Image (tube, rainbow, N blue to C red):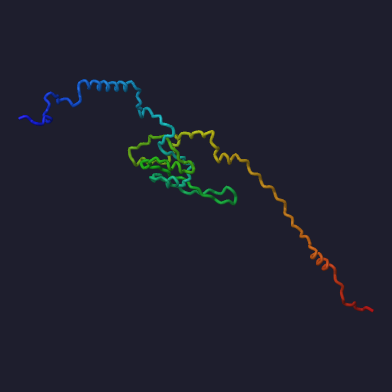
């Protein structure tokens, strides 16, 4: 009995070993196209950097690690307070500075004992560099500071000071920009000393007519109305 639905019957003339839509004439163009791509890649220059034998050329102002200029740090703790990851550790003590003039008062200043950054927590946001009011923190392009132990990624002052040597020089100022306020204030001529004021004279009050009459009457003695004794 013949199946009334011929769609479900396999086609005896169809080759089921080859995927649908693939013909011997369609394989050759794809193969040639792939070989052409390989040939173009072979003649191109290689851009692979042979690190660590060849160091990469980093773009200017690259963010590697944070360097410390210890002599500018006043231990104000502003960078540690603003750090969102709390990865900056600062220890300091106070030191008394004797008075420089006779009768002056001694002053105190903070002396930096420890400045460390835990780079396993740092997210390189740069907030500490921006908020430092004394220019003690800088971006260094140094990137070779990986360690085998995560606990050794907390780098202390000697390492941070060593990275300070790799900080690039700042870009020259724009010649069309306004001079800094410090330069403008230093270029102003010194203010002249105020002239000495003459001594104030005490004004003599001008006597009024009534006062003049009273003065003259008090100055002239009045005659004595009593008779002289022993007169004839």
Q: In screen coordinates, is 189 left or right of 25?
A: right
Give the mark count.
Answer: 0
Image coordinates of residue 158 in percent, x first then y, are 43, 39
Image coordinates of residue 101 in percent, x first then y, are 59, 48
Residue at image position (46%, 48%) is 93
Residue 162 seen in the current view: no
Considering every residue shown, the one lying at the far front of the view is 4
Residue at image position (44%, 34%) is 61
Image coordinates of residue 138 in percent, x first then y, are 45, 38
The answer to whether 7 is drawn above or below residue 114 in the figure is above
Q: In screen coordinates, is 138 left or right of 195?
A: left
Residue 78 seen in the current view: yes
- Quarter of image, res 59: top left
Q: In screen coordinates, is 106 left or right of 67?
A: right
Q: In screen coordinates, is 99 left or right of 205?
A: left
Image quarter where the N terminus lies is top left
Image coordinates of residue 218 in percent, x first then y, are 82, 68
Judging depth in this view, the residue of 175 and 15 nearest the camera is 15
- Quarter of image, res 41: top left
Image quarter where the C terminus lies is bottom right
Residue at image position (60%, 50%) is 102
Judging depth in this view, the residue of 97 and 201 nearest the camera is 201
């Amino acid at each position: 009995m013949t199946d009334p639905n011929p769609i479900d019957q396999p086609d005896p003339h169809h080759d089921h070993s080859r995927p649908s839509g693939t013909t011997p004439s369609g394989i050759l163009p794809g193969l040639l196209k792939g070989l052409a791509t390989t040939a173009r890649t072979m003649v191109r220059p290689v851009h692979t950097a042979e690190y660590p034998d060849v160091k990469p050329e980093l773009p200017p102002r690259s963010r590697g690690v944070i360097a410390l200029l210890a002599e500018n740090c006043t231990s104000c703790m502003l960078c540690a307070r603003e750090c969102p990851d709390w990865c900056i550790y600062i220890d300091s003590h106070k030191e008394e500075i004797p008075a420089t003039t006779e009768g002056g008062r001694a002053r105190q200043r903070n002396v930096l004992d420890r400045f460390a950054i835990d780079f396993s927590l740092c997210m390189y946001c740069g907030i500490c560099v921006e908020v430092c009011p004394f220019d003690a923190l800088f971006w260094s392009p140094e990137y070779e500071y990986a360690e085998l132990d995560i606990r050794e990624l907390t780098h202390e002052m000697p390492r941070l000071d060593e990275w300070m040597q790799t900080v690039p020089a700042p870009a020259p100022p724009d010649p069309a920009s306004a001079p800094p306020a410090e330069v403008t204030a230093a270029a102003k001529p010194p203010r002249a000393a105020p002239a000495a004021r003459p001594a104030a004279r005490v004004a003599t009050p001008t006597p009024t007519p009534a006062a003049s009459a009273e003065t003259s009457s008090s100055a002239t003695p009045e005659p004595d109305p009593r008779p002289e004794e022993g007169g004839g």
